[in-house]
Amino acid sequence: MKIMKDVVVIVLFLISFYGFSQDCTLDIGGGNTEVLTSVFQLNANQVAKLEALQGEFKVKAKASQDEMDKLLEKHPQSSPEELTKLGEKYSVLEQNLVNLSRAADKEFLKIFNEKQYNRYLELCREAIRKPIVIKPIIYNDSISPR
């Protein structure tokens, strides 16, 4: 009976840990094209799409970062209430930046073939991260398996 309780506790812990684990991001905005190209064996079309997504993300992220900087510069900060409001507004802008990054990652993952997406899932499991779920594309010119 004690062993059963221990097993239940461990399973609940693992489930709750997975529930709170972070998303498995690829950091499209990080400019690590070479690493992504190598790890996922991207073809020329995929590299071009990656670079386009990186460019789009950088423009959107810059606008979001500018809003955050403007908020910090202009928002009153002389009372605890004002600081609380500043924190709430900043959190919204920060979450927007996270959402932009996740959207870019998802768009990138949409161009993966099945083998590339399975590699992504494998890496996410190893890192104990929640993968972004997409349906991989079936390519006629896909790269051969490793």
Image (spheres, rainbow, N blue to C red):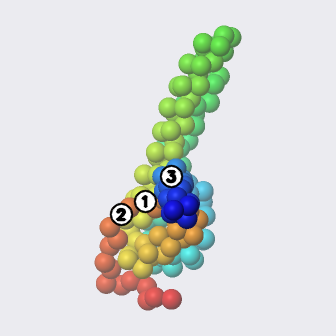
Q: What residue type is labelled 3?
A: Ser
Q: Which of 25 and 57 is in front in this view?
A: 25
In screen coordinates, is 120 left or right of 69? left
Residue 116 in the image: state x and y as whole percent: 45, 76
Question: What is the tally of numbered marks visible in this picture?
Answer: 3
Q: In which quarter of the image is residue 35?
A: bottom right
| Lower sequence index among marks 3 and 2 | 3
Q: Could you say where residue 128 lies in the image, as x and y percent from the top left?
A: 56, 63
Q: Name the residue under label 2.
A: 134
- Between 101 and 124, which is closer to the camera in this rendering? 124
Is the residue 125 above or below the residue 31 in the image?
below
For numbered disc 2, what is the local secondary structure?
Answer: loop
Residue depicted at 35% across the width and 63% down the height: 134
Where does label 3 land, which residue?
16
User: Would you say the residues marked 3 and 2 are in contact, meaning their CB atoms lie under 8 Å apart?
Assistant: no
Separation of residues labelled 2 and 1 (CA atoms): 7 Å
Q: Is label 1 or label 3 in front?
A: 3
Question: Where residue 132 is drawn, which disc sits there?
Answer: 1
Q: Are marks 2 and 1 in contact (CB under 8 Å)?
A: yes
* Residue 29 in the image, given as x and y percentages of width and height: 56, 54
Q: Earlier in the sequence, mark 1 or mark 3?
A: 3
CA separation, marks 3 and 2? 23 Å
